[in-house]
Amino acid sequence: MANGKFPPGFLWGSSSAAYQIEGGAGEGGRGPSIWDRHCRIAGKTPNGETGDVAADHFHRWAEDIGLMTEIGLQAYRFSVAWPRVMPRGRGAVNPEGLDFYERLVDGLLAAGIEPWLCLYHWDLPLALNDLGGWANRDSAGWFADYVTVVARRLGDRVRHFATFNEQSVSTIFGYAYGGNAPMVADYPTYLKAVHHQNLAHGAAVDVVRAHVPGASIGVVHNRQPCHPETDTAENRAATATFSTHWNEVFPDPQVLGHYPAAVAGDFEPYVQAGDLARICRPLDWFGLNHYGPMFIRAEPNPLKCGFGANPPEDPPHPDVGWAIYPQAFRQELHDTADRYRLPIYVTENGCGNWEETVAADGRVVDKHRLSFLAAYTDAMAQAIADGVDVRGYFVWSLMDCFEWGSGYGNRFGVIYVDYADQQRRILKESAKWYAGLIRG
Ligand code: BGP
């Protein structure tokens, strides 16, 4: 489908996250986060890999902006690391951390690339985790204080702010079954973490509005249609419960002003008078992250049942050869627009691969990713033609990076990072294709 199918002014960008690309973990006064500790626990990442060095973006940010320019990106979504700005999460501010983000933002602006700043992409300062982390109701206030520091320093040049990235992933993995940092597996603790992150979101919206006149504020949520692995009563029930948590417990209160009916009672003990009004603050856009549908197999922990089940059937895309579901993306764009009635920016979409190498001619031929992106952007164009208000698309990810529990093996970038050869960057074939789409 030709680029002519996208409306004028449609925004093309890419996304990244601080812990996944920056490195410089012990530099510039940065404090530790829950992920620094997590990666040091035996068996949590392949070969004990960490984000200590990652793609060394902390030092190579200027070169990376040059590559964004080469691709023709119009916007770049990055996250600010809370522990780089406030090493202990509250109290003392680290001027070197703020200087780093100021240089990055100035570099983007000089290159004509719009900075989209995400305030939280999973790297909670470790010192706050010692106080209970998101399970402590004070966390909303800690977050508001940190957001105030960032908004004051960068609000004169950054206009687009996202409060959080994928809260359901960080709380389900982090507090409901403990697969990721901070490795808690306790339903009541999870409920508290969800509610407090919701309060933190609302507080952050208010802080940014107060400090940044004309700010455009959104939040980034992953949403995926969920299907039972096989059609049994247990799997159907598990699917309904899982989907409510995965897709709704954050955006519903934030945008609609209430918890989903099926789980509202579970949250009740933690909700105080006035909380929902504090959480539901006016937003300018909805950031949708989407990779594919999920398949659910009932299991004792209802929040673990989305991981490990098999798709009931394999609908391979002709060019890709493995299961991809562009029509589920089109459906999700419809569902998100119908439910939340906000303009949508697709803030992440992309595809990982464990087997990517540099060919003898120096190219990285990532045909599968190119086909994936072509099919998914096509599905997005169809949704727009159907009338869904989609305003922009950010590919995940700008470059190969530390992929959380998968370490460095699973590559998601449109730019290849040769970790073994001085972090050399190579534009993959998908990046060249994306550049063509943007130019089109
Ligand atoms: C999102 C995260 C990104 C990145 C991406 C990879 O959930 O926001 O940080 O990790 O997922 O996709 P996948 O979930 O398929 O590993």
Image: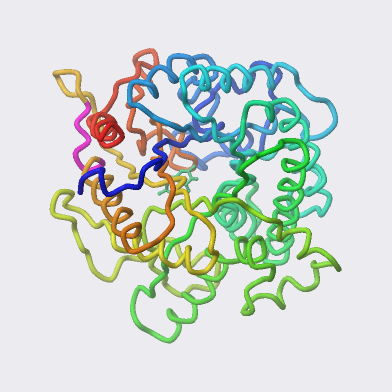
Q: Quadrant of residue 297?
A: bottom left
Q: Quadrant of residue 308?
A: bottom left
Q: Position of residue 22 (x, y in %)?
A: 53, 25
Q: Is residue 329 magenta?
A: no
Please tell me whether residue 162 is drawn above or below residue 290 in the rendered image.
above
Residue at 18%, 56% (x, y): give it.
317
Residue at 33%, 64% (x, y): give it.
386
Please tell me whether residue 428 is drawn above or below residue 300 in the rendered image.
above
Where, quadrant-wise, is the C terminus in this rendering?
A: top left
Residue at 64%, 79% (x, y): give it.
261
Please tell me whether residue 371 is drawn above or below residue 435 in the rendered image.
below
Q: Position of residue 37 (x, y in %)?
A: 64, 36
Q: Position of residue 158 (x, y in %)?
A: 62, 30
Residue at 40%, 40% (x, y): give it.
9
Q: Position of residue 401 (x, y in %)?
A: 43, 31
- Left or right? Give the position of 16 relative to 159: left
Tally the marks.
0
Which span is picked out in magenta? 364-369
* Extreme residue in the front direction: 8
Which residue occupies the foreground of this view, 351 or 42? Answer: 351
Colouring mode (rainbow / by chain / secondary structure / one colour): rainbow
Q: Is residue 366 magenta?
A: yes
